[in-house]
């Protein structure tokens, strides 16, 4: 069929050159004048293949990654792969950053380069992690570990701007939602307190490095409102590494469901409707949503099957900001130590020992002892005086 089309193009041009009218040619062939003039213009006695199709691909792509960056990504990926190290986009970005490349490509750009060059295949056989494993928290029983995150700003009709504190129990996938108009200190206390009254107080809560959670960069040792609330109630906060939101993967996945199945479907025009709708979604999720992690069960059925007795706040109203300084308790900061051997604790930097390079460490602040203890794979490797304010 393709050969017939090429012969048709050649015949049309021959008839035109012979003096036949364009109208007669187009009518007999069932083609437009635009089609005819296109191939007349394309005709060349010096090119015997003038009637062939040309590629429609543009000569230049404005958003194409510079070839130098593409070659660097391929080289770094090959080096990591040959060393039997993790060679995904994030690992490649870290290596490129250490090389001093500027500007740095984004994770998305690196993934596109890998896909374009068919460098997304995985190792064969079981992957054996090298170095220190990421310090995962226990999730065998309900309320051993919660993951929490703020979603927002989001908007209702009006417009009304709001945030939603989303909490997920990693053992049962039960959720607790608490919307508020801001992430101010008292809103943080109110949000956690209200959620704890419904799903219970955890042993640990894992959060990111939002200032609403840790406090202030100007006073990194002041213990922000959430840290104080947790320590006063026997909860140990765990702060994930900076710029690694996937470490809070369960609540991040829940946030997507919250956006798609609640905010994207329920029409709300006031904060009162938002609070009512959030509570209804929380109850519907916990009683009806099924998860493969729970072998097809719902969060509330997983809780009932555990026979674990939960711990709840003893007072109805949330504590008021500012809370008093805790005298005991611990909170933890997980960090990846880079080649500069610096440990960053909310903007304050400490020297890390050489054996921690390119490994995840846990910096534990002991409130009673006023010490910062550094752990590598559960073994203490360093200790600093850490007077809290």
Image (cartoon, grey):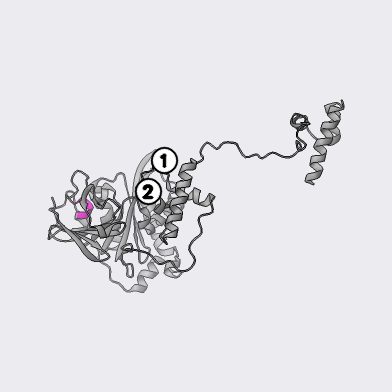
Q: Is residue 321 above or below residue 250?
A: above
**Foreground residue among 18 and 154:** 18
Q: Is residue 64 above or below residue 131?
A: above
Q: Residue at x 44, y 63 (%)?
A: 289
Q: Position of residue 193 (x, y in %)?
A: 25, 56
Q: Secondary structure at mark 1?
A: loop
In this orientation, does residue 30 appear? no
Q: Residue at x 30, y 72 (%)?
A: 308
* Residue linked to disc 1: 157
Residue 20, located in which quarter of the rendered image?
Answer: top right
| 219 falls in the magenta region | no
Mark 1 in CB contact with mark 2 (< 8 angstroms): no
- Is most of the magenta stretch helix, strand or loop? helix
Q: Position of residue 356 (x, y in %)?
A: 27, 59
In this orientation, does residue 279 appear? yes
Q: Secondary structure at mark 2?
A: helix
**Foreground residue among 53 and 264:** 53
Which of the numbered marks, if any, corresponds to residue 274?
Answer: 2
Q: Is residue 298 above or below residue 251?
A: below
**Drawn side of residue 325 relative to residue 255, left or right:** left
Q: Residue at x 36, y 64 (%)?
A: 130
* Stretch of the chain drawn in magenta: 223-227
């Amino acid at each position: 069929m393709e050969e017939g089309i090429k012969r048709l193009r050649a015949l049309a041009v021959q008839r035109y050159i012979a003096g036949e009218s364009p109208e007669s040619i187009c009518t007999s062939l069932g083609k437009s004048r635009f089609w005819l003039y296109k191939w007349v213009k394309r005709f060349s006695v010096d090119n015997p293949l003038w009637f062939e199709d040309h590629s429609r691909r543009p000569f230049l792509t404005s958003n194409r990654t510079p070839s130098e960056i593409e070659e660097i990504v391929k080289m770094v990926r090959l080096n990591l792969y040959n060393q039997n190290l993790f060679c995904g986009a994030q690992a490649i970005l870290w290596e490129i950053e250490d090389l001093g490349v500027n500007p740095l490509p984004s994770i998305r750009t690196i993934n596109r380069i890998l896909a374009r060059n068919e460098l997304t295949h995985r190792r064969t056989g079981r992957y054996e992690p090298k170095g220190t494993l990421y310090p995962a928290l226990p999730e065998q029983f309900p309320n051993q570990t919660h993951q929490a995150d703020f979603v927002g700003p989001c908007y209702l009709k009006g417009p009304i701007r709001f945030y939603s504190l989303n909490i997920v129990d990693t053992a049962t996938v039960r959720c607790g939602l608490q919307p508020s108009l801001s992430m101010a200190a008292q809103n943080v206390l109110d949000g956690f307190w209200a959620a704890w009254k419904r799903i219970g107080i955890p042993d640990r809560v894992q959060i990111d490095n939002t200032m609403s959670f840790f406090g202030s960069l100007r006073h990194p040792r002041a213990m922000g409102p959430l840290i104080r609330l947790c320590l006063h109630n026997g909860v140990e906060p765990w702060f994930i590494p900076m710029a690694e939101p996937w470490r809070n993967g369960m609540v991040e996945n829940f946030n997507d469901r919250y956006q798609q199945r609640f905010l994207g479907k329920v029409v709300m025009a006031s904060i009162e409707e938002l609070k009512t709708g959030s509570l209804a979604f929380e109850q519907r999720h916990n009683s009806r949503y099924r998860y493969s992690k729970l072998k097809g069960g719902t969060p509330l059925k997983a809780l009932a099957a555990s026979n674990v007795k939960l711990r709840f706040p003893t007072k109805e109203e949330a504590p008021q900001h500012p809370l008093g300084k805790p005298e005991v308790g611990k909170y933890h900061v997980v960090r990846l130590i880079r080649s500069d051997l610096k440990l960053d604790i909310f903007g304050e930097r400490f020297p890390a020992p050489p054996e921690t390079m390119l490994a995840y460490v846990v910096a534990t602040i002991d409130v009673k002892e006023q010490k910062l203890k550094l752990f590598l794979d559960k073994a203490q490797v360093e200790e600093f005086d850490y007077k809290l304010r």
